[in-house]
Image: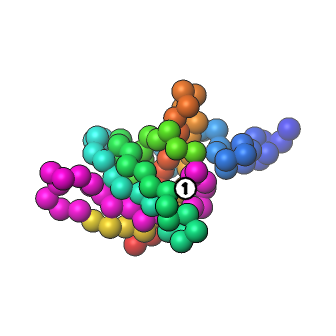
Amino acid sequence: MAMDEICTAKDRHGRRPHSGRDLRKRKRLKLSLAAHLRPFDPRLRDLEDIPLVVDFNRDGLHFITLMLHYFVGMKLEVTFPHGRNVTSQRKYIGSVVRIDDRGDGRSGISVKFLF
């Protein structure tokens, strides 16, 4: 198998094996705050998720979830942070850029903000 085939191999959910390289352009803030996520596609609007975000920067966020409906390229409406005690919430449109299988039934999802 050629090296480029290994690097681009994906499973049926569009997940790539984690290379271990950090490709971020900005430092991230480690935290534990809830986000409210909905697919931007009107056909999937009934799917909602309120996961805990584990790291964040102004370009995007990374969260852990048990839900399996995410795929690379999926557009999301993101409200972050989310909750009753939050004084300021922002809404973003984002795109799923990476899905990591954590091996325990959960997935790590990375979202890049588009605007």
Q: Residue drawn 43% across and 51% down?
A: 49
Please provide percent x and percent y for residue 60. 40, 57
| Amino acid type of the residue that numbered disc 1 sits on in the rendered structure | Val
Q: Residue drawn 55% across and 55% down?
A: 97
Q: Is residue 105 above or below residue 69?
A: above
Image quarter (top left, top right, bottom left or bottom right) of the C terminus: bottom left
Quarter assignment of residue 38: bottom left
Name the outermost residue toward the top.
Answer: 104
Q: Is residue 109 above or below residue 78?
A: above
Residue 84 counted in the magenta span: yes
In-image side of 43 versus 23 (left or right): right
Q: Which residues are magenta?
A: 69-89
Q: Residue drawn 64% across and 38% down?
A: 17
Q: Principal SS element in the magenta part?
A: loop
Q: Residues within 10 Å of mark 1 (few under 14, many from 20)?
A: some
Please provide percent x and percent y for residue 47. 50, 57
